[in-house]
Image (cartoon, grey):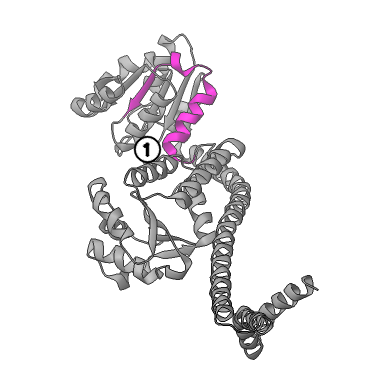
Amino acid sequence: MTIFALGVNHKTASVDLREQIAFSPEQLHQALPALREQTGVREAVIVSTCNRTEIYCTADTGTAPSSDLLLGWLAGYHGVSATALQTHSYCHTDAKAIDHLMQVASGLDSLILGEPQILGQVKQAYQFAKNQASVGSILERLFQQTFHIAKRVRSETAVGENAVSVAFAAVNLARHIFADLQQASVLLVGAGDTAELVAQHLTDIGVNKLHVANRTLMRAQTVAEKFNGYGHTLGELPELLPQADIVISSTASTLPIIGKGIVESALKQRKRKPMLLIDLAVPRDIEPQVDELNDAYLYSVDDLQGIIQENMRNREEAAQQAKAMIVEQTEHFMTWLRGLDHLHLLREFRQQTEQLAQEQLQRARNHLAAGKPADDVLAELTQRLTKQFLHAPTRLMRDAGAAGDYQTLAVFQQFYNDND
C-alpha cells in the first residue's frame, strides 16, 4: 500500500496559481469520484484552502499511480499547464506523506506558525470525502491519528499560544492588563480590516462593550453591528474617550487624530482611572506624548512587534517539540501499515503455495489411479514440489548475486540459518 500527498501551498506557489487549482465545494462533488477513477487510486481526500490545495490518496503498491499521473490529473481538471504546476508542486509518499499531513493539521506548515484554523479545514475535507465514500480503512485510520496528534500538539506544546499577529497581539496585551475584559469598554478608532480582526478577537474572548469610531459613520456601523457594538464618527471622540478603558486605533490618517490634550481631558473625567491605548497605525494615530500622562499606558505597533518576535521564537521552539511527537506518531502508523502489507503478502504466499501443492497432489493421484508404483509417484511428487518451491528463491538469489545485492543475500542467509 502506498500513500500519496501531492499539492501546492503558500511556500511553493503564488496566490494566482493557488486560486487556479482551488476546489469549490461544488467541484469536489465531481472531483473526488474523478480522482478515484485514476489507475490505482483507491481512497482520496482533497484539502483545498486559500493557502493550499493537496491530494491525499492511497493505492495498492503494484498498481500505484506515478506522481506525474496525479499531477497531470490535477492540472487537467483545472485547465492549467502541468509543466508550470510541476515547478510549484510537491509530492510525498508513505512516511513523508503521513508526516506532512500531521504537520499541516497541527499548524506547523501554515503561513502563521501554529494557527488553529487549518485543523478544522482538514476535518471538513476528511468528512466531505467520507460522505462521498472516498475514505476507506487506510485513510480513516490515518486521519483519525492525525486529529489525535494535532490535539496533542495543541494541549502539550505552546505552538498555538502567544500572539503572532498585530491584531491578536493587541488583544492579548489588553487581556493581560485587564483581569476581566467582559467588564471593560473598548473603543476602536478606524473600521478597516485590522480593526475588524481586532473586533473579532475581542468578541472571541468575551468583550461585550464595543464602540467603533470612523471617518464615515456607515462603515463604523457596518463593522460594529457585526459584533453587537455601536458605530460613531471621529467627531464624537471627545465624548467617547472618557468612557473607554481600552482604545485601539488603526486608521489610514497621515496625522495623529488623538492628541495629548484630548486624552488628558478624558483622564480627568475618568477621575484618573487608567486607560490603555494601543496604536496599530503607521503613521501613528496617537501622539507619542500621550505616554507622558499618568494613568495613560500607550503601546505602539513597534512595541507589539517586539512581543510578536519573542512569541514567534517561543512557537518555533514548541514546533520542534511538536515535530518530534509527529515523527513518533508517523512511525506508529507506518508500523501498522507495514503490518497490513506483511499480512497481505503472507496471505498471497500461502494461497500460491497451497495451489501448487494441490496441483501436484492431484497429479500424483492420477498417476496412482493409472497404476504407477506408489514409490515412484511419491518420489516424483517430492521432486516436483521441491523444484517448484525453490524456483523463485533460487532465481532471486542468482539475480541478487549477479547484481551485488548483498542485503537480499543476507536475508536469505538469515532465513536458512534460522531453519538449521
Res 149 quadrant in image: top right
Q: Quadrant of the C terminus?
A: bottom right
In the image, residue 33 lies in the stretch drawn in magenta: no
Instruction: Indicate left or right for 366 with 238 as reference.
Output: right
Give coordinates of residue 52: x percent, y percent: 37, 53
Can residue 110 be seen in this snapshot?
A: no
Name the residue rendered at 44%, 61% in the picture: 4
Q: Magenta part of the protein: which range?
A: 164-189
Badge 1 density bin: few <14, some 14–19, many ≥20, Cα 10 Å = many
In the image, what residue occupies the spot 46% across and 70% down? 62
Q: Give how far across and how far down residue 152 sits, in percent.
A: 58, 39
Question: Tag 1: residue type?
Answer: Ala
Q: In this view of the protein, which residue sits in the foreground, 98 or 217? A: 98
- Residue 165 sits inside the magenta stretch: yes
- Residue 190 percent coordinates (x, y): 30, 31
Against 233, is 54 above or below?
below
Q: Is residue 70 visible?
A: yes
Q: Is residue 407 left or right of residue 203?
A: right
- Residue on which disc 1 sits: 281
Q: Looking at the picture, tell me which residue is in the foreground, 2 or 226.
A: 2
Label 1 element class: loop
The relative height of residue 303 versus residue 138 in the rendered view (above or below) is: above
Res 204 quadrant in image: top left
Q: Position of residue 43 (x, y in %)?
A: 39, 55
Task: Name the foreground residue: 256 vs 38.
Answer: 38
Q: Which residue reaches farthest bottom?
A: 402
